[in-house]
Amino acid sequence: MPHPQDDHIGARIADYRKLRHLTQAGLAQRASISRGTVAKIEAGLSPATPPIVAAVARVLEVDVAILNGQPYVSELQADHLDRLIAPLSDALDLYDLGPDPEIIPRPIQQIADDVDRLCAHACATEYRDIGARLPGLLGELTTAFCVLPNSHRHRTAATLGWAYWTAYEFAYRLGYHDLATIALERMGWMAEQAQDPLLLALRYRHRSAMLLRRGKSELALRVLDRAHHLVGQHSAPRSVDALAVTGTLHLAGAIAAAQAADGDAVEGYLSLARQTAKQIGRDVPTVYWASFGDTNVRHFEVASSVQLGHLGQAMKTARTLRFPADHPRMRIGRYHIEMAQAYAQMGKAEAAEDALHQARRVAPQQARYHPLVRETIAVLVRRRRRAPDGLAALAAWVGM
């Protein structure tokens, strides 16, 4: 469904700013950004970066999803994903209802294999199969957790924890953030039942990301400190698994510090991440469904530089970055989205468009539902008298 010309993040910011009786200067002061930045974003001539959207949403007392215009219902309907949300919501409500007498769970290994396949789909940003199969698996696992012998309890709890993680990824990427929050809470509960500190630490890492959506960088860093403490409780804190989780926490800290515009703290977290990557000695793409290694560190060097506004440094680092063949598509797609944002900020329209096409090729469903993709496309369109065919095709593909 085509969107009207004034339906973009900047226009929604302007609407809520006026409802809150704020001038552009007043909003800029309270959000700690320049008035010129507010003016360009409201006019649709500059991309609203995630840190800016979070800061503005906090001042305007509105959820980030409202400013982003998520979820994108028309596009979800076109992809037949909208009808998958209600069954997932129902399945998340089963957690404390006990066993379903109509369900006879399969052996836990068979269920775990199915959950692993859905985790792999999540990392590849392939959402349709997740939405179709996950509600049934949640029902089966909820019953299995109640009826299987105690000898299987920790394994079943961990498997259910990963199913909840998949539910979080599915709901979060499609813009259903309240549902994602519920899934994340369920994940934490099961991680405790599994007595798995690494799984619980990863749940805290995702919790920090949810806090960053709301501009709560200081609280996000506190949550990450708690996650590091949990990794220290693991029986083998120097194992590859524990080190990989530790590294992802350092990288999350770098992004939180970048949102807080603390360049020194960013470098501190990245330095710790480099040391951890050196200890592992290789990229590990699927440890606890979290990738970590030198490639991830350099990717986050680019991402944090973009967030800090150090675009020249981001481009310099990006020139030396190469992704291994087995690197998660979610991460590669996100990198190209970040590069498109940076190129758009630098006024390099063709390079920005190329990066958007790359994001679509690598992880199409991620790109289709990512608010920054839409915002960057909208900025590029409004800066030109006539959109090139490739850009027009991208705009139509995301539903603009």
Image (cartoon, grey):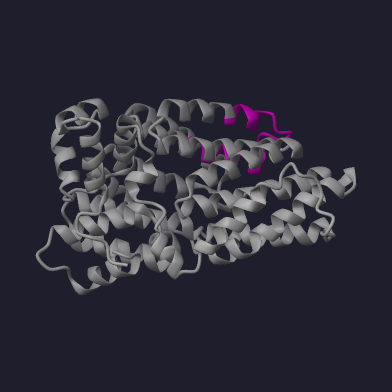
**In the image, 268: left or right of 231?**
left
Q: Is residue 238 magenta?
A: yes
Location of the C terminus by quadrant is bottom left
Residue 301 is at least partly visible in this image: no
Location of the N terminus by quadrant is bottom left
Residue depicted at 54% across the width and 26% down the height: 225
The boundaries of the magenta stretch are 227-250
**In the image, 261: left or right of 106?**
left
Question: Where residue 50 sits in the image (x, y, percent)?
Answer: 33, 42
The image quarter in which residue 71 lies = bottom left
Question: Where residue 301 sits in the image (x, y, percent)?
Answer: 37, 43
Residue depicted at 34% across the width and 32% down the height: 61
Residue depicted at 39% across the width and 60% down the height: 367
Question: Where residue 284 sits in the image (x, y, percent)?
Answer: 57, 51
Question: Where residue 195 sits in the image (x, y, percent)?
Answer: 75, 36
Task: Pick whichever, 211 or 155, lies toward us.
Answer: 211
Residue 260 is at least partly visible in this image: yes
The image quarter in which residue 131 lies = bottom right
**In the image, 331: left or right of 150?**
left
**In the image, 211: left or right of 16?**
right
Task: Pick whichever, 152 or 11, lies toward us.
Answer: 11
